[in-house]
Image (spheres, grey):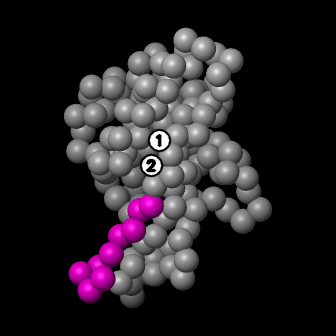
Amino acid sequence: MQIMDARENPERPIIGVGAVIMRDGEVLLIKRGKPPKKGEWSLPGGAQELGETVHGALKREVREETDLEIEVLDFLDTIDLVDRRGDGSVRYHYTLLDYLAVPTGGRLHASSDALDARFFNLDEALALPLWSETRRIISLAANRYEQLKGHPDDR
């Protein structure tokens, strides 16, 4: 008996949140334990739950996947992830809201649906086989993080 993923074949897009967590020139990535993109390095995050704010979802997902507490610094971008089957039907559709964040507490370790979690320097992270949008968002976050470090009141 095959178990169906409740997020597969959606009637409408699912709102997802992602965090680009920066620390001393490094970025945190997780190895995904569930579809879509199972086994691939990605940003920590996941689906927003009913009644939950976007920032609340972001903090919960990061805590669940990495055991870290974060401070959200800035909004980065919105991305649509539409995964289609060969016949054109939609398997998954996420509208992803990505944010820049920094760790404020906790002890990093992979938990929940993350197979691994670690900080990479930017060159290492960008050399990994990442989804092109993940690579773009990491670069955007690194630039924004440097701007904020120079102007901390610019949040």
Residue 83, magenta (yes or no) = yes
Q: Which amino acid does label 1 sit on?
A: Ala
Crowd tier of the residue under label 1, counting other residues whose Cα lies within 10 Å: few below 14, some 14–19, many 20 or above: many
- Residue 9 relative to residue 154: left or right: left
Residue 89: where, in percent of width, then height? 35, 84
Q: Nearer the viewer, residue 61 or 19?
A: 19
Asked if residue 133 is positioned above or below residue 151 in the image, the reply reads below
The answer to whether the residues at label 2 and label 1 have Cβ atoms under 8 Å apart is yes
| Figure quadrant of the N terminus | bottom left
Q: Residue at x 56, y 20 (%)?
A: 148
Q: Mark 1 points at which residue?
A: 110
Q: Residue at x 54, y 82 (%)?
A: 11
- Residue 87 relative to residue 101: left or right: left
Can residue 112 be seen here? The reply is no
Q: Name the residue under label 2.
A: 114
Q: Residue furthest top?
A: 150
On residue 78, which mark appears?
none
Crowd tier of the residue under label 2, counting other residues whose Cα lies within 10 Å: few below 14, some 14–19, many 20 or above: many
Q: Which residue lies furthest to the right in this view?
A: 51
Q: Which segment is the magenta one?
A: 80-88
Asked which secondary structure carries label 1, the reply is loop
Q: Residue at x 51, y 19 (%)?
A: 147
Q: In which quarter of the image is residue 43?
A: top left
| Figure quadrant of the C terminus | top right
Asked if residue 117 is positioned above or below residue 22 in the image, the reply reads below
Can residue 96 be seen here? The reply is yes
Q: Quadrant of residue 83?
A: bottom left
